[in-house]
Image (cartoon, grey):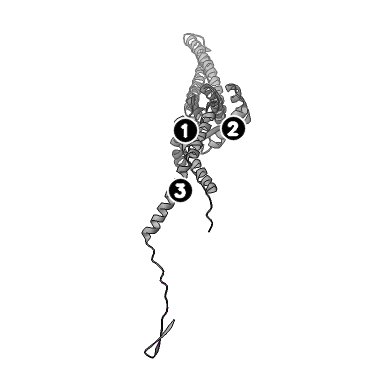
Amino acid sequence: MRARRQGAWLDYRVVSVAPSVDPVDSESAREVRVSEYVQRILRRWYVVVVAVVVAVLLVVLHGASPTHTVEGTATVYLGQPVTPNGGAVFPASLGGSVANAQAVANSAAVLRQAAAAGGVQEDTITGNVAVHQTAATAATTKTTGGPITVEIIVQGSWKQPATARAIVSVIATAVQRSANAYQTAKLTAAQQAIASEQTAIAQLQQNMSVEGGQISKLVHSSAASTSVALVALLNQRTADATVLATEQTSLQDNLNSVASIKYVEAAQIITPAAGRTVTATTKRSSYVIAAFIGLIVGCLIALAWEAVRRPRTVA
């Protein structure tokens, strides 16, 4: 717009000024928005109640005919075999590894025997057997390569803990037997050597007793030929005494070896099989979780219903 004043043209321009926005107003708008959602949910409160009730009822109905979950556990020491002469420890052995224990515990033959012992179907055990190294020996094995102890855990939907105990007992025995393959052969050889040495020692002691009696007779004899026979008997008795000492030393070594094999080298079940009932979550916690989920679902349904039923305004 132009106007003439005192001989000059003056321009009048209209400038639009945007109104300032108060931050408080935006916060109020957000509060109004949230309260609007709350009001929508409250208007459909019965939807939320129904959702909560349905969720809790589903938990109740699911627990109307519950299946009992039981667990069986056993701890097996996999042994620490040494070389045949007892001079060194094997740095690694197949039978003493966690991988071997896992393979044996989950083998079809062992699971079949375990199922028969527990009086259950084999497929209820398959996939439910876990074998892991205990925390107490894990750190030692990494640093010093010491012996390994594993825990065997079996879980299933059986009624009695005794079922799980019978199953895990068979599995633990199979793992122990597999880990003892070398130690068992070594023990058999040592026991056979002990039996042979004991027989030889008994025979040598009998021979020396006879030789002692003959020497005593010759000493008191006046025959001229006694001197030659006496020397021969003395030499024989000395030789027998040398062999006897060697056999006795060898026998003691083998006895020590047997003790070492049985109580140090051999795998052992150090914690016998045990069974117990396992409860993952209590009924109260299940109800609380179900009610919370029902509350969330009910609120969402109420909002959706309100949005669908709400009349649209015509611009």
Is residue 32 visible in the rendered structure shown here?
yes
Q: Which residue is mark 1?
A: 287
Frontmost of labels 2 and 1 is 1
Q: Which residue is mark 2?
A: 106
Query: How far is mark 2 from mark 3, CA to CA?
Result: 56 Å
- Give whichever of 157, 209 is nearer the camera: 157
- Give whichever of 171, 197 is nearer the camera: 171
Q: Amino acid at mark 2?
A: Asn
Mark 1 residue crowding within 10 angstroms, few (<14) / some (14–19) / many (20+): some
Q: Is residue 77 placed above or below 308 in the rendered structure? A: above
Query: How far is mark 2 from mark 1, CA to CA?
Result: 37 Å
Q: Secondary structure at mark 1?
A: helix
Majority secondary structure in the magenta region: loop
- Earlier along the polypeptide chain: callout 2 or callout 1? 2
Where does the image place residue 229, in percent across and percent down from the top left? Answer: 53, 15
Where does the image place residue 16, in percent across and percent down from the top left? Answer: 42, 72
Q: Which residues are magenta?
A: 9-16
